[in-house]
Image (cartoon, helix red, strand yellow):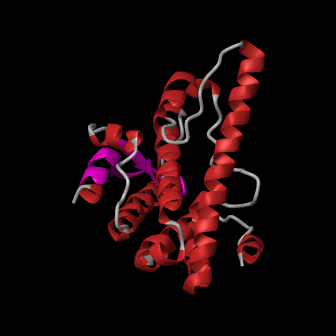
Amino acid sequence: MLDSVRQQFGAHVQGRFPDQAQAVAQLLTGDDGLVVAAAIVREFAGAAHAELVAQVGELYRRTGQGFGVDRRNYRPLWREAGAQLRWPLFQLPGGLHPYIQVAAAVTVVGGQARRAVRVLDPYPLLAQLFEVLDLSIAGWEFGRVRVDTDAASLVSGLIRSARELSDEMNEPPPLPPPVRELMRRNNTIDVYDSLGSGFAGSFNPGRTMREVLLA
């Protein structure tokens, strides 16, 4: 099913990302759909991590500067080296687009969280949701990534789905360091229309995390 999702939705049409994500989500039904949704999140997070490790290795070879790559907290890396890094969430190997397949998988996991904790191991899945959330916001803050409505929608979905999954776990783990750091802040980020028509509003990730994850 994962290969089918890649092939059928390989054409990425900006402005239609929400429709494409919804179409993917409709394919991910039942327990098999949940397994595929978790595989999408796992593969995407893993590919992004591998890309950053490669970038840091290349940076060390060129400049002698060494940086750690911690999957539980990417913020120190981006804070120190963001100007020298490429944000890795687009054009990763595997053909998974953050605003199509990944957004769909996040929606499916959150919407079927009660079943997910029975079908899947929820602990790595929750960690990977937070990992993609961390990478997304770190790119906004330190990687000069322009935030559009599709990006804000993905981050909102990651926060909601993490809460839904955590609520269904018998012993949910503590919130990871980047989430705790962001919840102590009230930085507001400008969000632009995904079609480039201008300013669309503001988004406060820290406040949203407090309202959703601590409710």
User: 119 or 199, which lies in front?
Assistant: 119
Q: Is residue 103 magenta?
A: no
Horizontal relation, residue 66 to residue 197: left or right: right
User: 202 or 63, which lies in front?
Assistant: 63
Q: Where is residue 135 in the image (x, y as percent from the top left)?
A: 53, 44
Residue ranking furthest to the top: 64
Which quarter of the figure is the N terminus placed in? bottom right
* Stretch of the chain drawn in magenta: 189-210
* Residue located at (64% from left, 43% from top): 49
Q: Where is residue 4 in the image (x, y as percent from the top left)?
A: 75, 77
Give the tally of numbered discs: 0
* Residue located at (36% from left, 71% from top): 168
On screen, residue 100 above or below 92: below
Which quarter of the figure is the C terminus placed in? bottom left
Q: Where is residue 177 in the image (x, y as percent from the top left)?
A: 39, 39
Q: Position of residue 30 (x, y in %)?
A: 56, 86
Residue ranking furthest to the left: 215
Horizontal relation, residue 165 to residue 76: left or right: left
User: 104 or 166, which lies in front?
Assistant: 166
